[in-house]
Image: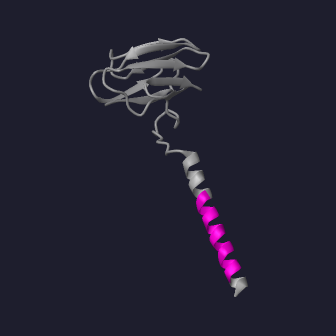
Amino acid sequence: MRITSGVRVRRSAVGWLLALLLLVATVACGGSDSGDGGGTTAARAGAGQIVMSGNKFQVPVTVAPGATVTLVNKDKVEHSVTSTQAGLFDVEVEGGESKTFTVPANAGSYSIYCRYHSGMTGTLVVG
């Protein structure tokens, strides 16, 4: 009978230990990542920033209408953040530099691209 009790205690302790490890792993990994499928990377920029790195855009999930956004170019080459909607916005950022611009005041999804690198595309969601 003592052997059975010892086995139950060990099994119970192992179960609690596994549950604790699972909890710690879940908390340590943080939340989920939302990919966006376009030419942007799965990693997202911080709120209020569009980061250009590795000839890809990292765009925040959403930006408030009329907000000021910082464009951060981590590459050595010049990039642009250009709206496919003619005349809406077109900002050039030299390599290693940053600029700010004001996003449109109207909510919506705005397709963006780099005039210098045809593979650099993304979507800026204002809402």
The total number of labels drawn is 0
Magenta segment: does it hold 18?
Answer: yes
> On screen, 32 above or below 15?
above
For the N terminus, the quadrant is bottom right
Q: Residue furthest bottom?
A: 1
On screen, residue 105 versus residue 59, left or right, reads left
Q: Position of residue 73 (x, y in %)?
A: 54, 18
Query: Where on the picture, by quarter, is residue 97?
Result: top right
> On screen, 65 above or below 76?
below
Of residues 23 and 33, the one drawn nearer to the viewer in this rendering: 23
Of residues 11 and 71, the one drawn nearer to the viewer in this rendering: 11
Q: Position of residue 75 (x, y in %)?
A: 60, 19
The residue segment tinted magenta is 5-20
Which colouring convention does the figure follow? Answer: one colour
Q: Residue at x 68, y 73 (%)?
A: 10
Magenta segment: does it hold 118?
Answer: no
Residue 115 appearing in the image: no
Q: Position of residue 13 (x, y in %)?
A: 65, 68
Q: Residue at x 64, y 62 (%)?
A: 17
For the C terminus, the quadrant is top left
On screen, residue 16 versus residue 58, left or right, reads right
Query: Where on the picture, by quarter, is residue 90?
Result: top left
Q: Residue furthest front?
A: 2
Of residues 57 and 97, the one drawn nearer to the viewer in this rendering: 97
